[in-house]
């Protein structure tokens, strides 16, 4: 009986981990050299980046396909920021530690340029 409970617990943990991983957007580095890093990010509706830190202070974001994003700070005392961004919009965003979550109904595709 104890083995059955352990097996059930293991399967529950495994399914929760798989569910969490499936809710992540995709990230592809398309250029990385000593001057710049360029990344393509795709966030289907309901997905997120996961908490992460931007290493470089200068960053621009070009929205190929805009939408509604929530930027969630790692600082629990700060309110999250909601961005409702149109296709083709370009933003400058300072380096930060945050989670990006697509809270809209459409896929968001962006190109992020980090100047080293």
Image (spheres, helix red, strand yellow):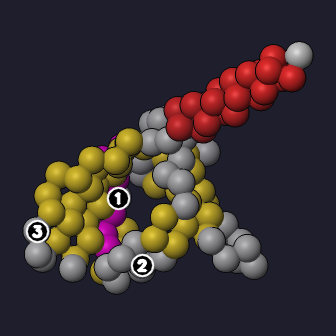
Spatial separation of the CA atoms under disc 2 and disc 1: 19 Å
Residue in the picture at 59% in, 57% down: 70
Residue 62 lies in the magenta-colored region = yes
Q: What stretch is highlighted in magenta?
A: 59-65
Quarter assignment of residue 37: bottom left
Where does the C terminus fall, quadrant-wise?
bottom left
Q: Nearer the viewer, mark 2 or mark 3?
A: 3
Residue in the picture at 42% in, 78% down: 95
Say if 91 sits above or below 50 in the image: below
Residue 67 rendering spot, x and y as whole percentages? 48, 46
Quarter assignment of residue 51: bottom right
Say if 21 sits above or below 52 in the image: above
Query: Disc 2 designates what residue?
Result: 95
One can see residue 80 in this view: yes
SS state under label 3: loop
The disc label shown at residue 33, or none:
3
One can see residue 45 in this view: no
Tags 2 and 1 touching, CB below 8 Å? no
Query: Disc 1 designates what residue?
Result: 89
Spatial separation of the CA atoms under disc 3 and disc 1: 25 Å
């Amino acid at each position: 009986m104890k083995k059955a409970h352990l097996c059930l617990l293991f399967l529950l943990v495994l399914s929760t981990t798989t569910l969490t991983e499936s809710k992540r957007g995709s990230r592809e580095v398309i250029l990385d050299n000593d001057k710049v890093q360029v990344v393509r990010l795709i966030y289907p509706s309901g997905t997120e980046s996961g908490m992460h830190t931007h290493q470089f202070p200068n960053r621009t974001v070009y929205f190929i396909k805009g939408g509604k994003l929530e930027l969630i700070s790692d600082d629990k005392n700060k309110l999250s920021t909601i961005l409702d961004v149109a296709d083709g919009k370009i933003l400058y965003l300072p380096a930060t530690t945050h989670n990006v979550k697509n809270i809209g109904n459409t896929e968001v595709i962006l190109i992020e340029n980090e100047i080293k």
